[in-house]
Amino acid sequence: MSHKILLLSGDGIGREVVAEAEQVLLAVAKDEIEIDHALIGGVAIDTCGEPLPAATATAAAAADAVLLGAVGAPQYDHLPNAQKPEKGLLQLRKAMGVFANLRPAICYAELVDASTLKPEYVRDLDILIVRELLGDVYFGEPRELQTTNGVRRAVNTMCYDENEIARVARHGFEAARRRQKRLCSVEKANVLEVGMLWREVVSAIGQEEYPDIELSHLYVDNAAMQLVRAPKQFDVIVTGNIFGDILSDAAAMLTGSIGMLPSASLNESGGGLYEPVHGSAPDIAGEDKANPLATILSVAMLLRYSLNLPQAAAHVERAVQQTLADGYRTADIAAPGAAVVSCSAMGAAVRERLTAV
Ligand code: IPM
Ligand code: MG
């Protein structure tokens, strides 16, 4: 059966990392996929006048999975929010209905020294953050920027209904069941009504449907502290959109570099949007310096979750591990003074090891 995969390179290093990931995808699943390309982000603004052109939304709806690079560049910073490249990504997530964003943070043995934390705190670290992706202050109404009597005022709204909380909570519980059976739910119930509802809903689901999972609750400020104090206490974390955005960047640094972190965003029907957690890195864009491993590992998640090809996924993950074991390092994960390889050389090294495993 042929699966339709849509590639959206986007901006900055997105183009470089997706080009490497595309070659990896072809190397492991050429006979089972059809690849299409479309525009999103700043490059779509320049070409079509909007960050998510209708043709891209249509192609995404028809695809079995979408692989995205990154969006955003400084030349669009002055635009109103509704016209920025990032808006294209948010609209795409909404259009695809991808409410469950899985962000694994794994510290590879080979990269223990790339973390800014002491090795004993991150060795064997394996955390999964399940971030709700379609609600919260990202999409809540009202939202506005207004001027009254010469004073500018901005409003965003944090809101969740219990169904939105429940469906992402179940993703968290299910993931915990496949792992260490521990789920930590993160909110701000001591201050926010949204947090109180979140805690109630997650607790009830835990008691009624997942008595085998050890459920804990943390306020987000404490969770941030615990994440850098003793990260290995966590197995799966489930949280809302904005807290998940912040905590997943913090978790990324535990692993050495945000350039290592893949993500999968899933909807009710198994369709998914796959992206590296990092951004478009305009400072190094076009220089062939970016780390393509987060996007290559996102390909592994795509193979596993949307194409149901777990062996091909494991094949890619093993090749990445072997590439690291063989000493290949892009600048973001290299020890000071150590030799570094380019984005394209890293991609090629992974592909060589694909054929070898
Ligand atoms: C992420 C990014 C996005 C987000 C931006 C680019 C809109 O930071 O995927 O974590 O805030 O969700
Ligand atoms: Mg982010």
Image (cartoon, rainbow, N blue to C red):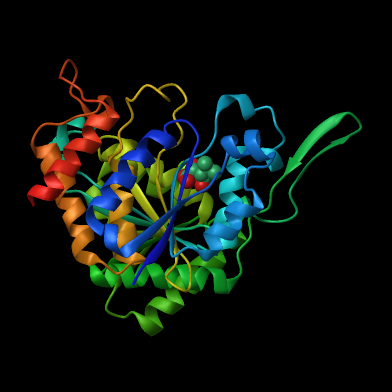
The percent coordinates of residue 349 (x first, y second) are 17, 37
Q: Residue at x 34, y 37 (%)?
A: 258
Q: Residue at x 57, y 35 (%)?
A: 43
The percent coordinates of residue 103 (x first, y second) are 36, 53
- Which quadrant of the figure has residue 111? top left
- Which quadrant of the figure has residue 347? top left
Query: Is residue 151 positioned above or below 9 on the image?
Result: above
Q: Inspect this view and state whether residue 62 appears.
A: yes
In front here: 40 or 212?
A: 40
In front here: 302 or 114?
A: 302
In front here: 278 or 238?
A: 278
Left or right for 132, reference 177? right
Residue farthest to the top, as pictured: 337
Numbered label tally: 0
Image quarter in which the N terminus is found: bottom left
Residue farthest to the right, as pictured: 149
